[in-house]
Amino acid sequence: MAKTFPGTPDAAKASAGVAAYEKDPAFKRTVLEAEAGTKAKAALSMAKSYKSAGKTDLARKKLQGILDEFPGTTFAETARKELEALQK
């Protein structure tokens, strides 16, 4: 609404609503999770395959990529744990 009809009273209300939601950490995390979904799951799966095949360097690289691309998500948390496990 704010982008489609800028300068209107409804656009101002929509912008205020968006600003309020953006201040909510739980909402932001939900949006991040939804946006990351398919791509992050595929990357985690690939890292797991690399690990199983003994290609730990490739697994580390893929996991680091997840941390870099999807910070603040459960996918990043999983990647961090997997990286820690590879270092043991």
Image (cartoon, grey):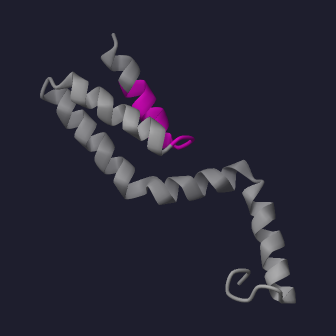
Quarter of the image that includes the N terminus:
bottom right
Residue drawn at the location 19% of the way across and 36% of the way down? 49
- Rendered view: 54 above or below 50: above
| Residue at 50 percent of width and 59 percent of height | 34
Q: Quadrant of the C terminus?
A: top left
Residue 80 horizontal side relative to residue 86, left or right: right
Q: Residue furthest left?
A: 53
**Residue 4: percent from left, percent from top:** 67, 87
Q: Nearer the viewer, residue 60 or 7?
A: 7
Q: Residue at x 61, y 50 (%)?
A: 29
Outermost residue on the front side: it is 7
- Residue 78 picture location, percent across and down: 43, 34
Tell whether position 75 is magenta: yes
**Which residue range is magenta in the image?**
71-82
- The x and y percentages for residue 52 are 16, 28
Relative height, residue 20 to residue 45 (above, below): below
